[in-house]
Image (cartoon, rainbow, N blue to C red):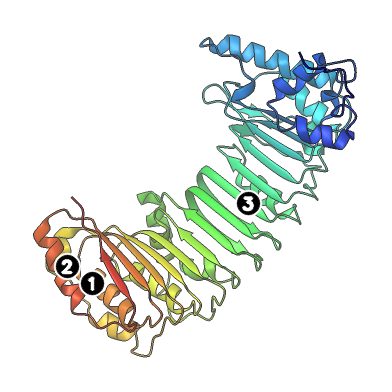
Amino acid sequence: MGDFSGPDLISDLPQSIIETILIQLPIRDAVRTSILSRKWRYKWSTITQLVFDEKCYPNCHDREAVQKSVVEFITRLLFLHQGPIHKFQIVNTSLQNCSAINQWILFLSRNDIKDLDLELAEGGEFFRMPSCFFGCEKLTRLELSRCELDPPASFKGFSCLKSLNLHQVLISPEAIESLISSCPLLESLSLSYFDCLALTVCAPNLKYLCLEGEFKEICLVDTPLLVELSVAMYMTDDVAEHMEQSSTCNFVKFLGGVPNLERLVGLIDFTKYLSIGNDLGRLSIMYNNLETIEMYQVSFEDMKEILVVLRLITSSPNLKELHISGSSNISAATYAAGFEFWEKECPTDSILSQLKVVKLTEMSGVPHEIEFIKFLLGCSPALETMSIIPSMYDLECQLKMLVELMKFRRASTKAEIYFIRGD
């Protein structure tokens, strides 16, 4: 047997280093270090980051028993904890709404909480955040799921908050807009699973924005620093009909004030949303920093949606990557009107001088898709690769589409076309 009576080098490390070690452990294991020695008995009790995930829950199929065990563990841990708590996170749990959470939030509000992540399990009522939550003045990051927010009239915002992520959160339109505008340092905002929300975003320091839900209307006001934007609209027929009656142009209202955009991802119904409103003329804005555009479910049977895509890419002189996903009906491939559109909207001097990578998916071979590909090949002198993935599985239709593509002039001598046919 070796001699283990040497000096205890780990226990004599500075507390900051010991804390760094402890926060890498699952929280239950960090607490268990109290049995190592008298020196370690209370080492865990001063760590500033508390993360409760699946690793710290008992392996049991009885959901009520698991919840009871979790609640008792967290409550006891907070009771024994000493000093500030900068990060408190509950994720991927079977924990549902319960009265104990109110006490936890009250404790955190008095202990300098900076990073709060509360993700409750599906089922049951949403947890209503207590009034003491709005007194967490040092919050820099907030992520809530399946919660209800009702800020009191005295609430003046979170002056230090930089990141806000709300998923399935119940909050009035007025309250969410007020919350966003009253966080002057906000840089990252994510809102998902919101229903029928007309939203105006006013955030002068915002850099990253992700929106997902059934939005009636979205307006970006005073967001000049925005560099990344991802949007999924889920437009219902009623919402679309309401928007069609609008006298303003959604494209200008949404993207007209974001000159520093670097990456744009338009998911479900986004091009449809941007195409609604007055006719989209030449844009007064240039997206000089925009390098990546991804637009999904673009209907090449709708000339207004095509125009949205063309306006975006021709107003982005430094565009390097383009991903377009189609949603056209192959039955319309036999006939299409309006080919003069391409001569009018795509002048021969159009040049996408920096475009290197193009990926086109769900292409059904409708005529306006073919014209769009022709346009890209003819005005992209730096193009390196174009990948085309058809949506139709009929070999004859695929070959017909491929023959058409081979006829087109390429502005780039090194452009390689990958036609990835389906099985």
- The quadrant of the rendering that contains the N terminus is top right
What residue would you read off at disc 3? 189
Q: Is residue 193 above or below residue 348?
A: above
Disc on res. 28: none
Which residue extends farthest left?
396
- Mark 1: which secondary structure? helix
At label 2, counting other C-alpha atoms closer than 10 Å, the crowd grade (few under 14, some 14-19, many 20 or more) is some
- Who is closer to the viewer here, 321 or 159? 321
Query: Of tags 3 and 1, which is closer to the observer?
Result: 1
Name the kind of residue labelled 3 in the image. Answer: Leu
> Could you say where residue 194 lies in the image, as x and y percent from the top left?
52, 43
Instruction: Name the residue rendered at 41%, 52% in the picture.
Output: 239
Disc on res. 401: 2
- Who is closer to the viewer here, 113 or 102? 113
Q: Is residue 346 above or below residue 50?
A: below
Cα distance in 3D space between marks 1 and 2 = 8 Å
Instruction: Name the residue rendered at 48%, 52% in the picture.
Output: 216
- Mark 3: which secondary structure? strand
Name the kind of residue labelled 1 in the image. Answer: Ile
